[in-house]
């Protein structure tokens, strides 16, 4: 009798559990809107790319992707907000090379660990930077630039899109390798620095491939070198830093990340959705028009790239002696 009663109690308990809402499987990811953090102001390159990718991923994932801009500390504030978010896949962020591989070396206060605090989802694009002078400049080549800088130390100047930017550090690497004194002048953006150069305020500028090729096509600039490991498909006749004897070469890139600790199945779904988006003709064409090459990757491949670039930038920054802020 006791055994019979115990069995009935067990069956009743099992029925209660089976009817409990908590026992039902949660809907598959994603079950509600996703937030995509952009660590830059609205209207800029990261923001444009984020909204473009978000539209295509949203259609694939069948959930809205809401873009949220969070600026500050050279992009680190926005990425830090992603790193500290709940690791459920519902907060992701667009990142670029400098914010994970370069800027962390220049900020004294550590906001997050770029190697362990975020989980890479995948790449969106790759591109690079170029060193240019006005088309009417007496500087005709990189060798000529070095010769003039050596004959007049501290007289020549170059601009970039900001203190501690990839353009700034690339210029410092160039100066160190050539043993020259060229003054760095930071500007609020690449367009501002190019306008200053064309207006005669500075002698040279580092800028992205897209901006540079636009100015080349307009007949306004002469390009001396590119900082990428290989020649740019947009500027195929321009030598790389490495070809010129400067031991440095990195592509810039964009990608998506999530907080560390997101479930593997969720990460896989985000990775697959991003890869589909990057493969869309609209995105590929838009990227090329912006001076970038569309390039997808696995999360592991992006993780390896972040680590490698982080180590290289750290070494170069230490060599140039650029101080932390």
Image (tube, rainbow, N blue to C red):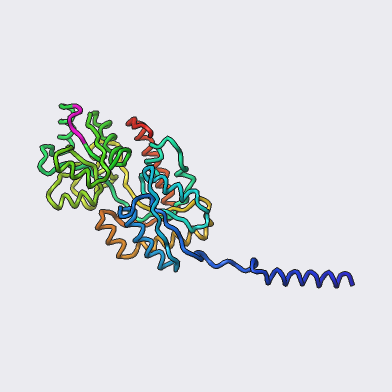
Q: What residue is rendered at 46% in x and 61% in y?
A: 34
Q: Position of residue 131 (x, y in %)?
A: 22, 42
Q: What residue is rendered at 24% in x and 36% in y?
A: 185
State the image quarter where residue 316 is shown: top left
In the rendered image, the quadrant that contains the N terminus is bottom right
Residue 323 is one of the magenta-drawn residues: no
Towards the viewer: 325 or 244: 325
In the rendered image, the quadrant that contains the C terminus is top left
Q: What residue is rendered at 28% in x and 38% in y?
A: 168
Q: Which contiguous range is marked in magenta?
A: 153-157
* Left or right, residue 294 beside residue 60: left
Whether 152 is drawn above or below 91: the answer is above
Q: Position of residue 198 (x, y in %)?
A: 15, 43
* Left or right, residue 202 beside residue 78: left
Whether 134 is drawn above or below 65: the answer is above
Q: What residue is rendered at 50% in x and 60% in y?
A: 266
Q: Number of marks in the image?
A: 0
Q: Position of residue 292 (x, y in %)?
A: 28, 54
Residue 155 is one of the magenta-drawn residues: yes
* Left or right, residue 52 beside residue 28: left
Towards the viewer: 211 or 16: 16
Q: Position of residue 91 (x, y in %)?
A: 47, 56
**Dominant SS in magenta:** loop
């Amino acid at each position: 009798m006791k055994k019979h009663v115990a069995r009935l109690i067990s069956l009743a308990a099992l029925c209660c559990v089976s009817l409990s809402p908590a026992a039902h499987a949660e809907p598959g990811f994603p079950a509600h809107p996703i937030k995509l953090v952009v660590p830059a102001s609205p209207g800029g390159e990261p923001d444009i790319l984020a909204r473009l990718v978000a539209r295509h991923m949203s259609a694939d994932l069948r959930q809205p992707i809401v873009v949220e801009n969070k600026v500050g500390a050279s992009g680190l504030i926005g990425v830090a907000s992603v790193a500290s978010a709940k690791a459920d896949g519902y907060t992701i962020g667009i990142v670029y090379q400098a914010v994970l591989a370069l800027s962390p070396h220049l900020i004294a206060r550590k906001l997050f660990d770029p190697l362990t605090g975020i989980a890479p989802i995948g790449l969106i694009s790759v591109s690079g930077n170029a060193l240019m002078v006005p088309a009417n400049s007496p500087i005709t080549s990189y060798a000529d630039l070095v010769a003039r800088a050596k004959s007049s130390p501290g007289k020549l100047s170059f601009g970039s899109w900001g203190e501690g930017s990839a353009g700034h550090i690339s210029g410092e690497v160039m100066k160190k390798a050539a043993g020259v004194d060229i003054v760095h002048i930071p500007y609020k953006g690449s367009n501002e620095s190019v306008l200053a150069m064309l207006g005669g305020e500075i002698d040279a500028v580092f800028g992205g491939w897209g901006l540079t090729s636009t100015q080349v096509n307009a007949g306004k600039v002469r390009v001396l070198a590119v900082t990428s490991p290989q020649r740019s498909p947009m500027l195929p006749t321009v030598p790389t830093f490495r070809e010129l004897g400067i031991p440095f070469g990195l592509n810039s890139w964009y990608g998506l990340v999530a907080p560390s600790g997101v479930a593997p199945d969720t990460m896989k779904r985000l990775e697959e959705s991003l890869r589909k988006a990057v493969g869309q003709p609209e995105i590929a064409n838009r990227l090329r028009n912006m001076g970038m090459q569309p390039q997808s990757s696995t999360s592991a491949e992006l993780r390896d790239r972040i680590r490698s670039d982080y180590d290289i930038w750290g070494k170069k920054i230490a060599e140039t002696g650029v101080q932390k802020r």
